[in-house]
C-alpha cells in the first residue's frame, strides 16, 4: 500500500499544482494518471517514489508506504547507455541468473540482449529492460512514467498485457488512449482551471472510457443548465429594467401636489430596487459554465489540394542508416489528399525514411511542406519564446497570440523560453507553426505522442478535416484508425500495404 496524506505541491514561482490531496494505491490497482501538459503528473510520481524534486517544486504532506516502491522514468539516463544490459539490470549485485531468465520470459526479450550495451537497443527494448530492472528488485508498487513513448505496436500490446496481468499495484502515465481503455481500473485526473490558477484533482474507480464518457456528459449537462439559467435571468433582468425605467419616469413627472402618489411611487421604487439586488445575487449564484482545460480550438484554414496531384512517386533500392541496411526496394506512391501512415518495429528505419521524404519534397515549389520531428529540438529554438518562434512564420502578433490562446497557453507561457515548457506544449507550438505556415503537405513523425489523451481527440479531428496530404509515422492506434486511409508496414523487404 502507498498512501498520500494532504499533499500540496507548489512551483517555485508560486503556482499550486496539487492542493490538499489524499489517496491510497493498493495491491492490484491499475491507476492511470492523466492531465494536460505541465500539470504535475511526472512530479507527483517522483514525489510518490521519494525522488528529490526541490529544483522545481516544493511540497507539504506525507507519503507513507508499507511496500517497496519502484519508479520507471520516461527514458533511461544517458549515463547508462554504455553499460552492459546485465549490469544495468542487476546493478552492483552479482547476477541472479535464474531470476534474470525468468524475467526474460516475462518480457519476451532475446537472451542475446543481456550481452549488448544499453545504447544499442531499440526504444521498445529499452522499456523492457527498464521494467526488468524494476522487477529484479522485487517491488510491490510500480510507478510508470510514460512507458508507451517510442514503443512499436508489438511492444505496446505486450505492455498492455503486462500491466493488466501484473498483480502489483501500478500507477502509470500514458497518452495512449487505447492502452488506457484496456488497462486502467481507476483514473486520477490532474487539472489546472481558471487560466491555470486553480488546481483540481479527481479520482474515479472506473475505466478510462467510462470516465471520459461520464465526464463529457456531466460537462454538457452543466453547460446546458448554465445556458438555461443565464437565459432565464436575462429575461428577468430585461423585465426589471422596464419596470425600473417606468417607475423612475413616473417619479420624475409626478406633480408635487400629489404627495400620496409620490409616497406610493417611492415605496414602489424601493420594491423594484430590492428586486434588482435579488437578481444581482442570483447572477452571482448562477451555475458556472465549465470549460475543460483540454478544450483546445485548433484547425487549418482553407487548405485544399487537387486530389489527383502527384505528391510522391519514389523508389529506393536501399534504405540505410550509416553502414546498416534497414530495407530494400521501397516504393511509395502518394497523391492529392492521401492520408498515409507508416508503421514498423522499433529500429526498422521509419524516421530515416521520413527524413529522406522530407529532403525529396522540400525541393518542390508547387507544394508547401510542413514537418514535425519526434525530436522537437530539431525544429524549435529552445532559447526563444513561442510568440517569437511563431512570428518568424507569421508576423501578425495578434493572430499568433490568439492561436496560442486557443491552445490553452497563458500569457506568461507565451513569453517563456520554449525550453521551460512541457513536451506536449512544444508539440502544440509545432502544430501552430504548421497551421500558420498554411502547409498543404504534412510529414508527421509521431504527432500525438506527447499530447494528453483528452487533447488528442481534438487533434485527430483537426487532421481528419485537413484538406491536404498527410504522411505520418505513428503507433497511436486511434490515430491510425481514425485519420489514416492507407497504412504501410516497413520491413526489410520494403513497404507492405496493410489491408
Image (spheres, rainbow, N blue to C red):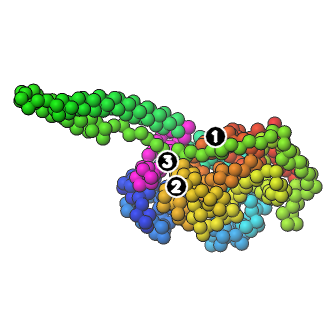
Residue 203 painted magenta: yes
Q: Is residue 376 left or right of residue 204?
A: right
Q: Give the residue pinned by disc 3.
A: 293
Q: Give the residue pinned by disc 2.
A: 409
Magenta region, residue range = 185-211
Q: Residue drawn 21% across and 32% down?
A: 249
Depth check: give the residue in front, 264 or 350: 264
Depth check: give the residue in front, 415 or 115: 415
Element type at mark 3: loop
Mark nearer the N terminus (1 vs 3): 3
Disc 1 packing (10 Å; few <14; some 14–19; many ≥20):
some
Task: Tell me which corner region of the image, top left, top right, bottom left or bottom right, holds residue 66.
Answer: bottom left
Mark nearer the N terminus (3 vs 2): 3
Q: Residue drawn 64% across and 57% down?
A: 394
Disc 3 packing (10 Å; few <14; some 14–19; many ≥20):
some
Measure the C-alpha gap from mark 3 to mark 2. Answer: 10 Å
Mark nearer the N terminus (1 vs 2): 2
Measure the C-alpha gap from mark 1 to mark 3. Answer: 17 Å
Q: Give the residue pinned by disc 1.
A: 461
Element type at mark 2: loop
Q: Residue drawn 48% across and 61% down?
A: 412
Disc 2 packing (10 Å; few <14; some 14–19; many ≥20):
many
Amino acid at each position: 500500500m502507498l498512501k498520500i496524506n494532504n499533499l500540496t505541491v507548489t512551483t517555485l514561482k508560486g503556482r499550486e499544482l496539487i492542493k490538499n490531496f489524499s489517496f491510497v494505491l493498493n495491491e492490484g490497482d491499475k491507476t492511470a494518471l492523466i492531465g494536460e501538459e505541465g500539470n504535475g503528473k511526472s512530479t507527483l510520481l517522483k514525489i510518490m517514489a521519494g525522488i528529490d524534486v526541490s529544483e522545481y517544486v516544493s511540497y507539504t504532506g506525507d507519503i507513507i508506504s508499507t511496500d517497496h516502491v519502484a519508479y520507471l522514468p520516461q527514458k533511461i539516463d544517458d549515463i547508462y547507455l554504455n553499460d552492459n544490459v546485465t549490469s544495468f539490470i542487476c546493478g552492483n549485485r552479482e547476477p541472479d541468473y535464474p531470476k534474470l531468465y525468468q524475467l526474460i520470459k516475462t518480457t519476451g526479450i532475446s537472451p542475446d540482449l543481456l550481452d549488448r550495451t544499453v545504447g544499442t537497443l531499440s526504444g521498445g527494448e529499452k522499456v523492457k529492460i527498464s521494467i526488468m530492472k524494476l522487477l529484479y528488485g522485487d517491488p510491490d508498487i510500480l510507478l510508470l512514467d510514460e512507458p508507451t513513448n517510442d514503443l512499436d505496436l508489438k511492444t505496446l500490446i505486450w505492455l498492455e498485457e503486462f500491466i493488466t496481468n501484473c498483480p502489483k499495484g501500478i500507477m502509470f502515465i500514458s497518452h495512449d488512449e487505447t492502452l488506457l481503455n484496456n488497462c486502467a481500473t481507476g483514473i486520477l485526473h490532474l487539472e489546472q482551471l481558471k487560466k491555470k490558477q486553480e488546481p483540481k484533482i479527481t479520482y474515479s474507480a472506473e475505466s478510462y472510457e467510462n470516465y471520459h464518457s461520464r465526464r463529457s456528459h456531466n460537462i454538457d449537462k452543466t453547460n446546458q443548465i448554465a445556458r438555461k439559467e443565464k437565459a432565464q435571468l436575462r429575461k428577468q433582468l430585461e423585465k426589471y429594467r422596464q419596470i425600473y425605467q417606468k417607475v423612475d419616469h413616473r417619479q420624475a413627472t409626478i406633480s408635487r401636489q400629489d404627495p400620496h402618489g409620490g409616497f406610493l411611487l417611492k415605496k414602489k421604487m424601493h420594491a423594484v430596487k430590492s428586486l434588482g439586488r435579488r437578481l444581482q445575487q442570483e447572477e452571482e449564484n448562477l451555475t458556472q459554465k465549465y470549460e475543460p482545460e483540454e478544450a483546445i480550438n485548433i484547425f487549418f484554414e482553407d487548405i485544399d489540394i487537387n486530389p489527383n496531384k502527384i505528391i510522391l512517386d519514389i523508389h529506393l533500392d536501399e534504405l540505410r542508416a550509416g553502414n546498416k541496411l534497414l530495407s530494400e526496394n521501397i516504393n511509395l506512391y502518394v497523391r492529392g489528399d492521401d492520408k498515409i501512415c507508416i508503421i514498423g518495429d522499433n529500429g526498422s528505419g521509419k524516421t530515416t525514411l521520413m527524413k529522406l521524404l522530407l529532403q525529396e519534397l522540400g525541393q518542390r515549389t508547387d507544394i508547401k511542406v510542413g514537418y514535425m520531428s519526434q525530436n522537437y529540438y530539431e525544429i524549435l529554438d529552445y532559447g526563444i519564446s513561442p510568440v517569437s518562434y511563431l512570428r518568424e512564420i507569421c508576423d501578425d502578433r495578434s493572430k499568433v497570440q490568439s492561436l496560442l490562446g486557443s491552445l490553452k497557453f497563458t500569457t506568461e507561457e507565451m513569453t517563456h523560453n520554449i525550453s521551460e515548457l512541457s513536451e506536449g506544449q512544444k508539440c502544440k507550438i509545432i502544430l501552430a507553426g504548421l497551421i500558420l505556415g498554411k502547409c498543404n503537405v504534412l510529414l508527421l513523425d509521431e504527432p500525438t505522442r506527447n499530447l494528453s489523451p483528452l487533447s488528442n481527440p481534438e487533434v485527430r479531428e483537426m487532421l481528419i478535416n485537413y484538406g491536404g496530404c498527410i504522411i505520418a509515422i505513428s503507433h497511436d492506434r486511434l490515430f491510425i484508425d481514425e485519420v489514416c486511409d492507407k497504412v504501410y508496414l516497413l520491413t526489410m523487404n520494403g513497404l507492405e500495404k496493410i489491408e
